[in-house]
Structures are given as C-alpha cells and as structure tokens.
Image (cartoon, rainbow, N blue to C red):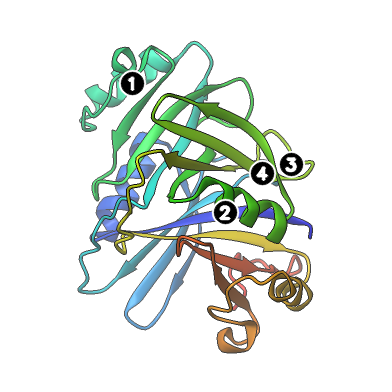
C-alpha cells in the first residue's frame, strides 16, 4: 500500500482564536477551508510546503467545547538546528504559554501549548520547512500490537526508537518517505496504564492512491471497519487502530483546486 501521512486533525473551541494563534506564532497560511452545517474545517501549513508535508486540520463544531484526553500526546513542529533557544524565547515574548523550556528538556527540544491546551513539541531539524509537522505522538497500551498494526496494515516501517527505563518511543513512517514527511510516534509506558481519548484530538489522515482498493486491502488485513467508503459518499473512509485512534483514508483529485474531496 502506497500512502502518505496527509494531515492530523484537532478540534478547537474558538476557531478565530486558534487560527490567529497558529498564523501569528507559526506563520501558518490557510491552505483551504470547508464550511459545513454547524462546523468548519480549515487546513493550515507553512507558506512553503514540500509535496509530502502533512497539514494541520483544525475543526470547529459550533457550540462545542472539546475535551482533552491523554491518549493523544502532541504534534511536533520543526525549527532549524541551533535555533531552539532563540525560537522559544521569541514565542515567550509573543505571549505563548511557558510549558517546558529547552533547559528542562536537556536543550534538545521544548514544549508549548496552543489555546486549547494541545501540546506542541519544538524539535530541531536540518530538513523541512520551519514549523512544518515533524511527527504526531500517540500513546499506546501494547507496543507490539501498535507496531504490528502500522507495519502489517499500512506497510509502514520503523525509522527510529528510544527505549528508556520507564517508557519507549517508536517512530513509524511510510516506506521510502521523504525526510520532510511526517512520522507517527508511538509512546509506550511500561507501567500498564490506560488512557482516555477525549474528543479534542480527532484523527490522523493517510492519503492513498485508490480508496476502494486500499480499503479492501485493510479489511483483508483485519483492520477495523469503522466507517467504510460507502458510508462517506465514497470520498474517504475511517478505520481505528488497536487503541481506538481514528485513522482516515483519503484520496484527493489532483485535477481540482480544492484540498477537500467534496
């Protein structure tokens, strides 16, 4: 299965506040927008994006105040090598919440929060546009099952791991992915804890070549039949991993101007 991590979706309480935050602090541009019945979806990303770069999808449902859980961890955005301290200082001067500064993270990375409390890691990279999505972290209750899900169902490969005394991080990505593409970080805590998903984090989206053929392949590989293509007007579909994280399958029409399939 050929696929690319297309976007990660988060839900926000105040659309204009969130858009303003990401546009001010990350210099994101609105890539596309869809106004539905009682909801709005906006795709955001840096001004210059690699063709394989993932976008951030912000969803606002009118009258709803999303609840954070701990099953979803964070998104990570790239900053240039050697600029972490300067970037963090600038964000603090701009009024961003001081959550975990570089010093507390050994000078290797840092964390901030957006207006809805979504955690955002700042990671130093020598590739990819500044502020582009580097990875999305999700917490899993069984590392073997999680790695098996991504390698068997989607044919992803493990591209990195860090095993500490109390937890481990495993990074997976499509085969032959460009450095600019986003990865998925699977975090496994050894103490057997369970997690609450909440609804503030939405889903990961995988862009595929053929929606129906790839969905059929996933079903043959025993992925969960959550929302099949026919339930979604044959425009997209949803499965879930072993921990209940939602994963969208989407095929875009390259002949249209819109990023949305409808």
Whole-number angstrom distance, CA of label 3 to CA of label 4: 7 Å
Task: Say whether residue 208 is left or right of residue 85.
Answer: right
Is tag 1's residue or tag 3's residue first in the polypeptide sequence?
Answer: 1
Instruction: Look at discs 1 and 2 and give the one toward the viewer.
Output: 2
Q: Residue at x 66, y 44 (%)?
A: 173
Whole-number angstrom distance, CA of label 1 to CA of label 2: 36 Å
- Label 2 packing within 10 angstroms: few (<14), some (14-19), many (20+): some
Residue 123: which numbered mark, if any? Answer: none
Q: Which residue lies under the disc numbered 1?
A: 88
Whole-number angstrom distance, CA of label 1 to CA of label 4: 28 Å
- Callout 3 touching callout 4 (CB < 8 Å): yes
Q: Position of residue 249 (x, y in %)?
A: 63, 68
Q: Residue at x 30, y 26 (%)?
A: 91
Q: Which residue lies under the disc numbered 4?
A: 173
Q: Which residue lies under the disc numbered 3?
A: 177
Instruction: Look at discs 3 and 4 and give the one toward the viewer.
Output: 4
């Amino acid at each position: 299965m050929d696929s690319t991590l297309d976007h990660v979706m988060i839900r926000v309480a105040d659309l204009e506040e969130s858009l303003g935050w990401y546009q001010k602090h990350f210099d994101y541009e609105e890539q596309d927008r869809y106004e539905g019945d009682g909801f709005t979806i906006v795709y955001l990303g840096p001004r210059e994006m690699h063709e394989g770069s993932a976008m951030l999808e912000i969803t606002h449902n009118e009258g709803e105040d999303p609840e954070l859980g701990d099953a979803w961890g964070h998104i990570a955005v790239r900053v240039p090598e050697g600029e972490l301290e300067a970037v963090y200082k600038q964000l603090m001067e701009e009024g961003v919440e001081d959550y975990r500064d570089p010093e507390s993270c050994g000078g290797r990375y840092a964390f901030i929060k957006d207006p809805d409390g979504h955690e955002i890691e700042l990671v130093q990279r020598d590739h990819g546009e500044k502020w582009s999505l580097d990875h999305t972290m999700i917490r899993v209750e069984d590392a073997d099952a999680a790695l098996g899900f991504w390698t068997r169902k989607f044919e992803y490969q493990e591209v990195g791991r860090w095993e500490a005394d109390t937890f481990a991080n495993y990074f997976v990505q499509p085969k032959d992915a460009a450095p600019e593409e986003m990865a998925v970080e699977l975090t496994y805590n050894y103490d057997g804890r369970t997690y609450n998903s909440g609804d503030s984090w939405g889903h990961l989206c995988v862009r595929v070549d053929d929606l129906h053929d790839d969905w059929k392949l996933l079903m043959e590989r025993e992925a969960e039949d959550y929302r099949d293509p026919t339930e979604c007007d044959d425009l997209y579909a949803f499965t879930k991993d072993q921990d209940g994280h939602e994963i969208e399958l989407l095929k875009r029409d390259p002949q249209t101007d819109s990023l949305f399939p409808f």
